[in-house]
Image: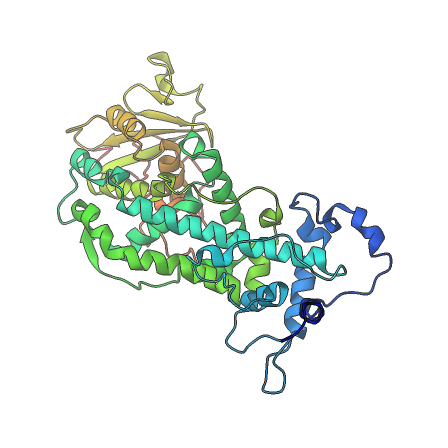
Amino acid sequence: MVSSATAFVFLHYIISALAVPTPHSGISSRQDEPCHNLANPYDESCWQALDLSGYLTKWNQTTPICTGTKASNCCRSDEPWSTCFLRLARGAADKDCHVIGTGQACSFDKDQAVDISIAPQVHYVLRNIYAINNLFTSWYTALNFASNNAQLKIQSIVTELDPPQEQNVFLNQILTALSIGLSFIGGPQAGALVSAAAATAAQTFVKAVQQAPTVAAALWPSGTENSQSIQISNLESDLSLGADQLADIANRGLELIMSDMPSFIAFAQSGAFSGEKTIALPDQSFEVTLALKTYILTTAMTANKWKAHALPYSKEQTPQNSACTFDSNNICGEYTYYSDATQRVYTLTRNGYTGVRPNELMNDIIDKKWAGLALMFDGAYECTVAGKMGQDPFANFGVGGDFSTACVSQLNFCIACGIPCPVPEIEGVCPFGRCVDDCD
């Protein structure tokens, strides 16, 4: 049995193996610098100040793989880099943060006996590992809550819009729409629909994924993994078919981050996970369903011949202004809406005007919390301008750095009779087609 003194020296030796320090002088004096004083609160700027990208890259390159003759100060061949880092830093082998649901095995204790020359770097790398795991765990918890909760209100959307019973969607697109919800609520169009905690988590996630396209590709791989077709009217019951896939989606991203060092660096390098603020969704978060509800709503609207028009006017120039004023929902008259986020004016119409009126539907969308009008109109507008409307709305999420949730909204946009193209034409052609039957 080793003595406590021997154990301390051994632990100190293991922890020192984490270092690939650049020689420098005056280590003790550097404790006055904010990022080197471990008693200070966490600071987002410390990722850059401590050059954690360089530190981790060098650590990854120089930490050896364990062999028969080398069993300490090394990473096992089947061990993710993050688990190895935690094991060497903590002196314990049971810390694993690359799978969701590890519970207390992935909790953080900031009091550690780490060599002073590398203590700040180790301190902040551990902070990032735990913070990213916490975000993914909270995201998965929120997805489970959302998919199992009746407040998705899918059936009420179906009832009001009366989509044709043959209107089908692919299950993988439904699951992607649900999982993409965290990114969907990160933009200004979500506004008051999103709590402060959810907005912070969403904005951090979007920025991280944009910097780490490999993570986006892992979360939402191109192609259709589950092409099972389901009817919109049966969606509430059929969502249960995708519970395992939701777990797979979240775990794919986390596992890549925690096992591939470049992906971790890209995802964390903004510094957001180095700060004092907790980056996580509330356990009971309805906001993540906004993308799914927007996708279902606009798919049903387009199937039932609803169409939107972008007007080449400002809010003040809108022709209807002489007959009405914009109300608290930014709706004017029977069919006009103004987006504060983009300062665009839209109209919503339907061939035949049977059933619910445009202004009634727009108010229902807001009052029943089916979606946000800005998310619905601005998204479909931007998707149409990009030439992607009618394609798989989720086809490009994992491709390169082009990560846009605009096409979650599948509302049909066209040019009304007598209205000029609202954007510059491309090679003489307006991205918006002419509305069918409008000029008959």
Q: Residue furthest left?
A: 165
Left or right position of 95 against 88: left
Which residue does the image show at 51% across and 40% down from the upper left? 200
Q: Please tell me whether residue 324 is drawn above or below residue 379 in the rendered image.
A: above
Q: Nearer the viewer, residue 165 or 248?
A: 248
Residue at 82%, 65% in the rendered image = 23
Residue drawn at 73 percent across, 61 percent down: 118
Q: Is residue 205 above or below residue 257?
A: above
Residue 157 percent location from the top left of the image: 22, 36
Q: Is residue 400 visible?
A: no
Judge whether 389 appears above or below 157 on screen.
below
Q: Position of residue 254 (x, y in %)?
A: 47, 59
Q: Residue extending furthest right? A: 25
The image shows residue 83 at horizontal and vertical percentages of 54, 66
Closest to the observer, 431 or 34 = 34
The mark tally for this picture is 0
Q: Quadrant of the C terminus?
A: top left
| Residue 372 as seen in the image, left or right of residue 49 | left
Residue 415 drawn above or below residue 116: above
